[in-house]
Image: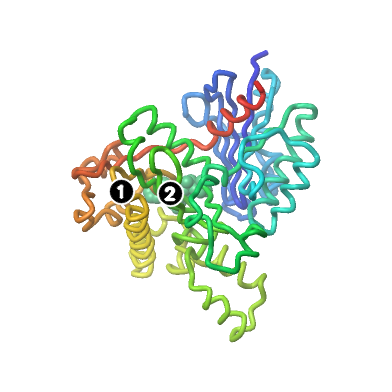
Amino acid sequence: MTRAILTLNSGSSSLKLGLFDEDLNALAMGHVDRIGRREAAMKLTGSDGAPLPLPETAPEAFATNAAALKTALAAFHADFERLEIVAVGHRVVHGGIDHAAPERVTPALIKDLARLAPFAPLHQPHNLAGIRAAIDAFPGVPQIVCYDTAFHRGHPFVSDVYALPRAYYDKGVRRYGFHGLSYDYINGELARREPGLHAGRVVVAHLGSGASICALKGGKSIASSLGFSALDGLPMGTRSGELDPGVVLYLMDQEGMSAADISDLLYKKSGLLGLSGISNDMRTLEASDHPHAAQAIAYFAFRIKREIGAMAAALGGLDGVVFCGGIGENSARLRAEVCADMGWLGIALDPQANAQDAPEIGSDRVRVLVIPTNEEIVIARAARQVLSQ
Ligand code: ADP
């Protein structure tokens, strides 16, 4: 039997599974998205990245996160029969102040992480549900978690704090930053492929359904556009991004909205979806000729551009920009809009390289790279490391 590590990335409406051998070669990947919607779908790929045939599934197979997880695990059934799963690695969105390094799941840790659910109400409960389901499916197998907040825990004070009375900082109202597994992967790739750039000042734009920007100085995160919750910074598929807190007060006082109403508005109905009124999906917006679709894309690009400028100031200059995530890796149009008129900062694109999603697309002083991110392998690496301790 081949020994293998399973990774689980259990989000609010998507689920990603990875199977790796002990040398961290990918054996298979599974991806379910749009969980709970009629258009929910699963994709399976083999070790060569080629699609695998899908098993027959019942209509309710993706109705809830728990059902989707069961369906996806069942799809790997044949693999599980020939593999010995030696560890299950999990992405957990929030480690709070106390948890940064990857660690083994214990009943006490689950309780501790559940206490952080109010900090990430749309993500943490799903992460924990994934852990519980994996404990049931693989009893006795070590479960190992790694945190999306961990990569940013070394932020300097000014990047970690809000200007509220100090008591709130002490209670954990801080800027945590997220997408840490993705930034960890990109940082590792820079160290491996571009050591000179890795030692310098780099802005990484992780642009997927969730989106954020991270400033890397000498391989360390010094600032992130995401803060206390997964709502800050850039607009996202359905999330508002940065908002004047006065808007929230107005919605409560004048529109009589409850915290639950506002949460629903800001997490699920805003961002590209809210602005366009058409879709949260970049491909759909790019294909639309409705002016509101173009405006939503323009706002997204403008906020990314602004954030790159802000991060360049935080870094004291800029040597490189990296695009990653579904949009960053695939949308030549978005990258072109972001980088337009950025010559003042030393950023310009080679249009042909950009159109081909080439690994290197810049044509000026600042290097501009497209690096496909891989959160799954970061989880698998962490699981292997903890297992060996
Ligand atoms: P998640 O955060 O759920 O992992 P992804 O990183 O998969 O999300 O990114 C999803 C986004 O990437 C969607 O908005 C999708 O439309 C966009 N995307 C994927 N492929 C393309 C493409 N070829 N052109 C433009 N956008 C794309």
Q: On the picture, is 191 further left or further right than 35? A: left
Residue 165 location, quadrant:
bottom right
Amino acid type, mark 2: Cys
Task: Name the residue nearer the viewer: 132 or 171.
Answer: 171
Q: Residue at x 29, y 49 (%)?
A: 317
Residue at mark 2 to residue at mark 1: CA–CA distance: 20 Å
Tell me the quadrant of the picture where the N terminus can be found: top right
Q: Residue at x 52, y 55 (%)?
A: 160
Q: Residue at x 54, y 23 (%)?
A: 24
Task: Name the residue nearer the viewer: 269 or 192.
Answer: 192
Amino acid type, mark 1: Ala
Q: Earlier in the sequence, mark 2 or mark 1?
A: 2
Residue 276 location, quadrant:
bottom left
Tell me the quadrant of the picture where the C terminus can be found: top right
Residue 96 coordinates in the image, percent (x, y): 64, 50
| Label 2 CB-ligand 1 distance < 8 A | no
The numbered mark at residue 218 is none
| Label 1 CB-ligand 1 distance < 8 A | yes
Residue 114 coordinates in the image, percent (x, y): 74, 50
Q: Would you name the residue on which mark 2 appears? A: 214
Looking at this rendering, what residue extends furthest in the bottom direction? 254
Q: Would you name the residue on which mark 1 appears? A: 332
